[in-house]
Image (cartoon, grey):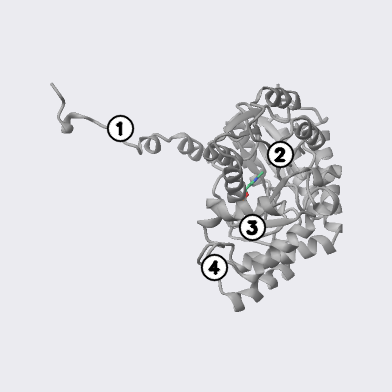
Amino acid sequence: MAESNSDVRTKDIFSKAYDFTKADEIKDRGLYPYFKPLQATDGTTVQIDEREVIMAGSNNYLGLTNDPRVIEAAREVLKSYGTGCTGSRYLNGTLDLHLELEEKLADFMRKDSCVLFSTGYQTNEGAIQTIAGRRDVIFSDKDNHACIVTGTLVSNAKTMRYQHNNMEQLEKLLNRADEKAGKIIVSDGVFSMSGTIAKVPKLVELKKKFDTRLYLDDAHAIGVVGEGGRGSASTHGLMDEVDLISGTFSKSFASLGGFLVGDEEVIEFIRHNSPAHIFSASMPPANVATVLKALEILQDETWRLERLEEISDYMRNSLKDMGFNVWSSQTPIIPVVIGEMMECFEFWKGLFEAGVYVNAVVPPGVPEGQSLVRTSYMATHTEDHLNRILEAFRKVGIEQGIIDQNGHSLLG
Ligand code: PMP
């Protein structure tokens, strides 16, 4: 006998939310490190829970978010353009400021053309979805950012993922792929958790050998590494060999938004076809003005990039000398691997109480057993800030049995 509708108990689509208890347990233990509201900040220090702590977990690499010139640039355009664009670039949302920024970024990155998106996430998701279709193949590093993964999923292209930075495996996959399919290799230029730089020379070699295209997401690389801060390909003088390079404004550029540079025809195609570009409101004027000023400062004040590199080397070496595992960092992103999730939260809390804010990263953000605190540095950190951060790491590391007094790791 057929069941009547009222007898059938359907699964509540919200049950996963009601069953989500992990965060409760962490909260009960007073270790929950996420969604902490900052009450005020001058860039390098922040006020949280009514206390001042040093910020060692921001992507504000050039230290420009609180620069008076950047703030003034944003304030100035508010008067003439208002607060928002209320429409997409395609329709009523294009300002002359957007065009000016696109032109300046294309010049800076020494590419033909540039298109802006409203976030870095939308840039990669929107561009990959548009450029790769059903009959194409995307080769994607397994550690690529989530927005690349989303882009590959919505593109409907066949996606072949290779182990992080494993060029032998990438070559095998390239060998195996349908010769006639359109192909593109997509990689983060600097990986956001490990702070490792992609193997750009090898990626370029494989791109040429297999006649594919190459796309780099330089969100953590532009304004950070390479000649004049031009990113990961520029560290090897290979910018001409990379077909598409994306960047974000939420890090070195002290704002919000993203961009993609490449050949004119390809950028025009993406501009006219990417849903993320066409169906989403454009960057607000103050954000654009912020980036224009930050780009000017990046080019005028080269000391910022030099200082950033010096600080990163100092912090990486000092943390290593204390016995911490800093993974494979080569940039201002310096992870400190702790291992188990709860221990990582304990370590995070210890650092916070010692006056330092870092980011706790646990699975699925990193592999099981590799929970870490992600530290990152700014050109504006002073020596005093850096030494206070190191002192906190030493103190909490010893207290929690992660390192000993003699610079050895106590982790198994
Ligand atoms: N790409 C990478 C590698 C990132 O780390 C991020 C964000 N952290 C993005 C893209 C997205 O940028 P946004 O936060 O500006 O949207």
Name the residue carrying label 1: 11
- The response on whether ligand 1 sits within 8 Å of label 2 is no
Name the residue carrying label 4: 85
Q: CA distance from mark 1 to mark 2?
A: 45 Å
Residue 172 falls left or right of residue 118: right
x and y percent of residue 170 in the render? 71, 27
Residue 229 vs residue 26, the one in the foreground: 229
Q: Is residue 218 visible?
A: no
- Residue at 73% over, 25% down: 171
Q: CA distance from mark 3 to mark 1?
A: 42 Å
- Residue at 77% over, 39% down: 197
State the image quarter where residue 271 is shown. bottom right
Name the residue carrying label 2: 213
The amino acid type, in three-letter code, at marker 1 is Lys
Q: Which mark is residue 58?
A: none
Name the residue carrying label 3: 116
- Judging from the image, what secondary structure is the residue with disc 1 in? loop
Could you tell me if the residues under marks 3 and 1 are in contact, i.e. CB atoms within 8 Å? no
The amino acid type, in three-letter code, at marker 4 is Cys
Q: CA distance from mark 2 to mark 3?
A: 21 Å
- Judging from the image, what secondary structure is the residue with disc 2 in? strand
Q: Is residue 11 visible?
A: yes
Could you tell me if the residues under marks 4 and 3 are in contact, i.e. CB atoms within 8 Å? no
x and y percent of residue 237 in the render? 86, 45
Q: CA distance from mark 4 to mark 1?
A: 42 Å
Quadrant into which the N terminus falls = top left
> For the residue carrying disc 4, how many other residues have a C-alpha within 10 Å: few (<14), some (14-19), or many (20+)?
some
Q: CA distance from mark 4 to mark 2?
A: 34 Å
Q: Is residue 52 above or below residue 292?
A: above
> For the residue carrying disc 3, how many other residues have a C-alpha within 10 Å: few (<14), some (14-19), or many (20+)?
many
- Between marks 3 and 1 in the image, the one whose residue lies nearer the viewer: 3
